[in-house]
Amino acid sequence: MKRRKLSKKVAVSTPHTISNTEYWSDDGQSEVTESGYDSESFALDKEHTFTLDAHSAVKTSTQESSFLLHLEKNLSDEEVESLSKKKWKYRWEVPSLDLSNCKWVGTGDCCLKTQDMLDSSTRDVKQSLYKHWLEVCKLYGGRDFPVSKHGSFFNIFNSYRDVLHCNKKPFYLKGHGEDSNIMDAYLMHSLNHIFRSIDLVKKNDTKVAKLQETAESELLIDDVVRDRGFTRPKVLILLPIRHIALRVVKRLIQLTPQASKVNVEFMDRFLEEFGYQEDEADLDNEELKLKIGNSKSQKISKPSDYEALFGGNSDDDFMIGIKFTRKSIRFYSDFYSSDMIVASPLALREKIDKVWAKKEEDFDYLSSIEVTIVDHADVIAMQNWEHLAVVLEQSNRMPSKQHGTDIMRIRKWQLDGHARFYRQTIVLGHYVNPDINSSFNNWCVNYQGKIKSVCETHKGVLRKVLPDLRQIYERFDVGSIADIDDMRLAHFINKVFPKIKDSEEGGIMIFISSYFEFVRVRNFLKSQNASFCLLGDNTKPKDVSRARNWFIQGKHKIMLYTERLLFFRRYKIRGVRDLIIYSLPERKELYPEVVNMLEGANNSNMSCTALFSKLDWLRLERIVGTASAKRMVTSDKPVFVLC
């Protein structure tokens, strides 16, 4: 490769941190150089890299860090072509350190061969970060980092491979320890990546400045000074609601070394906008009357997991830039001068749509994202997974403008349009579904490869259902995924509806997982002039109260109830005698909740019927257990009775 010739006349920003002087513009903000990095940004750490094993921390050279090994590789045309074909083969598997019923599988060479290797393997992280992490862990009663779950997950994330881990127990389902360990690991990985990026730029600024001072005519600058992308943001964290964002960002501040957070700017504004806000529009009429009628009364109780997840600010439209300077963390920084962006998929999708509608200029701040973290992917799936899929698809595209970046310093693979092959995507959640799998397969094309967790056995949740209730599972045959919706509706029309259409007592609830299925069943019932009411995704609280009253009074015999409304509102319906689960819920914890609505009905009259096919395998095994699911899918008999 030819070496670049750089004339002395070419303007290269010289770092102000060579001296101990801080420069400020008139408006009180730090001066921004052409490179996009502040004159007050971090001074270089002397140690550069710390290598960690189970017993010690040993210094190594910067060149050995996984950060540089990942970003300094230039892909060949053959490698780019192979990656573009999106063919991934998981060639190895390793038992999970934390979950006895799960394993890790991966592409390429195995990087997690044994537990001993994980415990003793090196994990390079900046010394200041490592020391502070140990202090934080000890302060909050955690174990020593290298032998804890923090360390094992950090090692996985620090491999810079794409990661899919959708078997974690979230904090709102009493999984505080596990969830916090994983959150610590990805936040430390993000901080390590950001701090190393800033260190590298400052180091190269100093190198270029010294070469310019000593050169007589022109300089030969190697590709080592290619240290940045088109724009500054490097880490994107996607979260479903403000309450979770508050939890993540507060932990981010705790994990940042004290010297780098002397000032946390605009923290009060952040707490005000992301803290708890009760919205009475979110209460149904019964709850509102109870709240207004007796000031000492509490709202109607919801399940504990609902209170933990939605007890804070549940707004799903937010986006905030976070900038790290030499001594401060600055919230609400301009996206183009931020190091990290924390956002909801909805907010970013709205930004993208506005650009497409020419209401905004661009979203080029996504062009150089190097680490994308999707946490609580299962909650995002309950909102609208398409928003996240669009964000992944539109990330790492060539920018429409230069945005003041020194083009002489942009990495070659960025200029070649290969940034998407270098972006690490980490997807974390409580369960996996076809949408999550599809996005991980199609939009996560990191050249380093993929790692994902696979749960080998599920226990199911039937033990949480009413003990005397007989649950009838009816299997319908389906040839391909394209036919499943039509075949499910046909089975309902031919086998199920004839049993309920002439019901005189009513009390029939039809539980439906997706809005698309909800619309199809609703249209069919309309065509049959059936007596029914609706609890759909977009039903307003006042209409919900009216429908619940009609149903319990017998004015409407059938009620349609969607999983999304149950998840986000948790309305308990009284008067249910006959439950038909048109499609199994994605979230296994909702199954006993909806089935137990039969409690209080006459045992001789209540019934529960669930429809499924072999293509519902992921949902089925989470609910009935892996062993039972295998029998139900492979048996010659199409009807099963579970107690």
Image (cartoon, grey):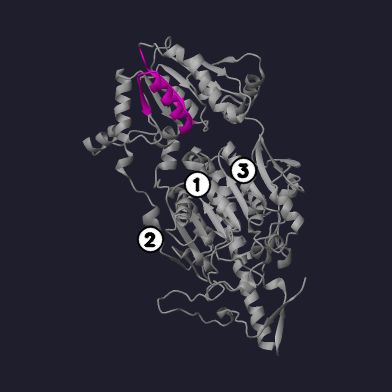
Image quarter where the N terminus lies is bottom right
Q: Secondary structure at mark 1?
A: helix
Q: Is residue 430 left or right of residue 3?
A: left
**Vertical relation: 189 (above or below) 171:** below
From the viewer's side, name the closer residue of 378 and 313. Answer: 378
- Label 3 and label 1: CA atoms lie apart by 20 Å
Measured as percent of width and height from the top left, residue 558 is found at: 38, 20
Within 10 Å of disc 3 (Cα), the crowding (few <14, some 14-19, many 20+) is many
Residue on which disc 2 sits: 268
**Which labelled disc corresponds to residue 190?**
none
**Which labelled disc corresponds to residue 165?**
3
Where does the magenta region start and end? 505-534
**Vertical relation: 378 (above or below) 203:** above
**Vertical relation: 267 (above or below) 157:** below
Is 530 included in the stretch rendered in magenta?
yes
Is 8 included in the stretch rendered in magenta?
no
Query: Residue at (35%, 12%) from the top-left corner?
Result: 505
Image quarter where the C terminus lies is top right
- Amino acid type assigned to the residue bearing label 2 in the image: Asp
Measured as percent of width and height from the top left, residue 164 is found at: 62, 44
Within 10 Å of disc 2 (Cα), the crowding (few <14, some 14-19, many 20+) is few
